[in-house]
Image: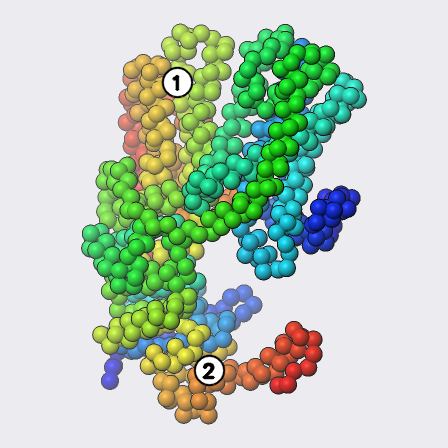
Amino acid sequence: MQTEPIISLRDLTMEYPGKRVLDGISLDVFRGQIIGYIGPNGAGKSTTLKILLGLIQDYKGTVEIFGNDLRNEDQDVKRRIGYVPENAEIYDTLTPMEYLTFVGELYGMKRAAVEHKAMQLMTELGLEEVLHTRISSFSKGMKQKVLIISSLLHDPDILFLDEPLSGLDANSVMVVKDILAMLAASGKTIFYSSHIMDVVEKISNRIVLLYNGKIAADGSFDELKCQGEAGSLEMLFNQLTGFNEHQQTAKRFVELVTGGDVDG
Amino acid sequence: MDNFRSLRVMDVFKGLFQTVGIDYPSMRTIVGLKLTMDERRIPVVFSQTKLKEGNQFLKSLGLYVLYGLATIPFLYFGDSVMLQMGIVFGIAMFMIMTSLIADFSSVLLDVRDRILLAAVPVDDRTLNAAKLVHVSIYMTLIALSLLGIPSIVILVSKGISFFLLFLVMMIFLMLLIIALTAITYMVMLRVFDGERLKDMINYVQILLSVGVFVGYQVLVRSFEFVGLTISYEFSWWHFLIPPLWFAAPFEWLLGGNTSKPLIVLSIVALIIPIIAIWMYIRKMPLFERDLQKLMSEARVGKQQHPVMMKFWEWVLCKNSEERASFRFSWQLMKRERDFKLKVYPSLGIGFVAPFLFLYIFLSDGTWEDMITSNTYFMIYFGFLIIGPLAMMLSYSSKFKGAWIYAVAPLTSVSYVKRAALKASLAQLFLPVYLLQAVIFTVFFGWRIVPDLVVVLFSAVLYAVICYAIGAKGTFPFSLPMGESVQSGTAKQIILMLLIGVFVGVHILMSKIPYGTPIYLVVIVVGCLVGWNVLLPVKRKYV
């Protein structure tokens, strides 16, 4: 259906001293896809995202976004990208209004326009009361919402999200899930990493599993299901990452806690 | 963890703690844990120097020993024992109380206790006792280092009875200080909410830094003003000065002065601390409850309309990118406590220094001499603000938020940096400088205005040089605050010497005919060149 990939990775390799985090990853992402990027802790998910954003530069291989090599640092490419970092990293002594105006203006929007849009978006997510309250007093979920808004202010074509749903309550998760689905339907490309398999299973139309710096699986959930005998993404995840002793681990752990035998 | 000498000293009083119903082993564990954590904390006194391993507090005690030495001359100052001891206790009280507020607010106001230890089966009495013991240990250490050597001097030169009285009075003074500090916090907690309270503490810490600088300059000179033979005479307002309460017993018991007010003062010295500490222990549960405020910060804020920010933004910035960064930097500097803690003391020092040196000049010469001289060049001491300010611009306690710079499509990184530097100068340096300039103009007359303009432009040039040296190509607010202490003192010294260069050239130029206007042109051109070379605006192709 699509011919031109929006994002294209070729032989992407990234090494930290003593550790190869990414080991020759090749991947094409097309318009309108929602990619769920999963893998165990430390598999290199965040590293991949940071490379795509230009936050890490000493990688090997090529990365192209909209057909532009990232090494050329094209500001027009950056203008079409939105990003939500993990752990809600934000200058939290500012108020959402102050932060969002700053971000919007950096993306070349007019101040009045940003202010108006920020207010409307904040209101939709139930944050109109705290528009002028310091972010430092927010819960993790509220911070996350502010970051999601900041990533969408300038109407980007690609969205990179690192654990976008962390800290959100059940209702907000549903809203954000629907927002992502609708954004993708309107032609935006979404690339996000997560640990929450249920969510990934439901909202991604393509799942990429990273393990030991390599892509261990790539396809829609149904396609992946056909490859193994797993019934859920969680089980598939365990299977592909070679982790099948969760019960034994749990048993040993509980035994240590209670100091006795447990019927596994 | 069990290897703290202070814990072993505490063990001596084990029985005492247990008789008042405290779970001693639990308390010992808690205090031990806190002492362990303290080894990883840096006190305010050291905030300007290097980050080192070990209990920084213990190392800072050396400083208190020095301060303590400074009290020794007062023991032989004049003939009145009341005055001598009043000054000594006054210094001790100021030093201990300020350090208690600055370094131990985190202990007194620790809310993590509530979260982490409330779930553990330890009763409140034990928890509170642990807190009190923890603070007392440090206070004792401070008091010992501050007054250890002076008390030996007292023992040797004034005899054993004087020495013993001194020890007793010190203990009561310390009780009073603990209670007073805690009660101050109680009142502040009542009146202010969490955020405001943290701001208040911040201001106290800043005051401390400035107070120490100015205090010592003034103290050293105070000898010259006060005559040496003063005998003590009572006035009613002496009841309002706690150090005098503690000095009274010396005058009464050892000086043989049995006037009634003195005896009353002595009794006050014993009774008030006991009442205060009793009140503190009684009100402690209430205090702990109010502490919860520190955690709940959900305060619905109002939109602020900072007039100065909008004005300077409009005057100083060229495009929307620079304006956005300017506002961002302005707001961040206004709010970040760590930034304020590092920068505001130098703000105070920079403001006071020129006047202080004029004052020193005045003690040798007359007012007429001064206002006709070229001592107005002292205003260059205001530059002491700029170095730390420009250096600190790269740091933030929320430095991880700096990803936004890398992700955003900036046309030039220099706009962001220029905006941050401009915002810092406009917000912090300029108000101080303008005030100084006005006062100096009142002192020295209109003749110095051209020079003041030169100084202003020199400041702008100096600032960009400081920033270029300090920031080394990093984005503003993008490095962790803790690292700032490592950025060498050597650099600071070089930057200070650079001020000397500016002063020197300016003085030379002012000596030749038409020197000042020529130098003004030179310095303005220097500004333009400096800013464009050091923060060049070009497309970012790295």
Q: Amino acid at mark 2?
A: Glu
Which of B486 and B121 lies nearest the eye of the viewer? B121
B249 relative to B41 in the view: left or right: right
Task: Identify which residue, B25 or A191, lies in the foreground.
Answer: B25
* Residue B44 in the image: above or below residue A261: above
Q: Is residue B98 above or below residue A122?
A: above
Secondary element at image label 2:
helix
Identify the residue at horizontal 70%, vertical 18% (top origin): B250
Relative placement, left or right, of B301 versus B199 is left
Q: Decide if residue B46 is in sight here.
A: no
Disc count in the image? 2
Rendering quarter of residue B141: top right
Name the residue type under label 1: Tyr
* Residue B121, image x, y percentages: 64, 59
Q: Which numbered disc covers residue B339?
A: none
Q: Which chain is home to disc 1?
A: B
Q: What scheme was used to colour the molecule?
A: rainbow
Q: Is residue B222 left or right of residue A148?
A: right
Q: Quadrant of residue B512?
A: top left
Quadrant of the drawing holding the C terminus of chain B: bottom left
Instruction: Identify the mark at residue B376; answer none if there is no mark.
Output: 1
Residue displayed at 46% across by 71% down: A44
Q: Residue at x 42, y 27 (%)?
A: B351
**Label 1 to label 2, Cα distance in Å?**
75 Å
**Are marks 1 and 2 in one subunit?**
no
Q: Position of residue B419 (x, y in %)?
A: 32, 44
Label 2: which residue? A234
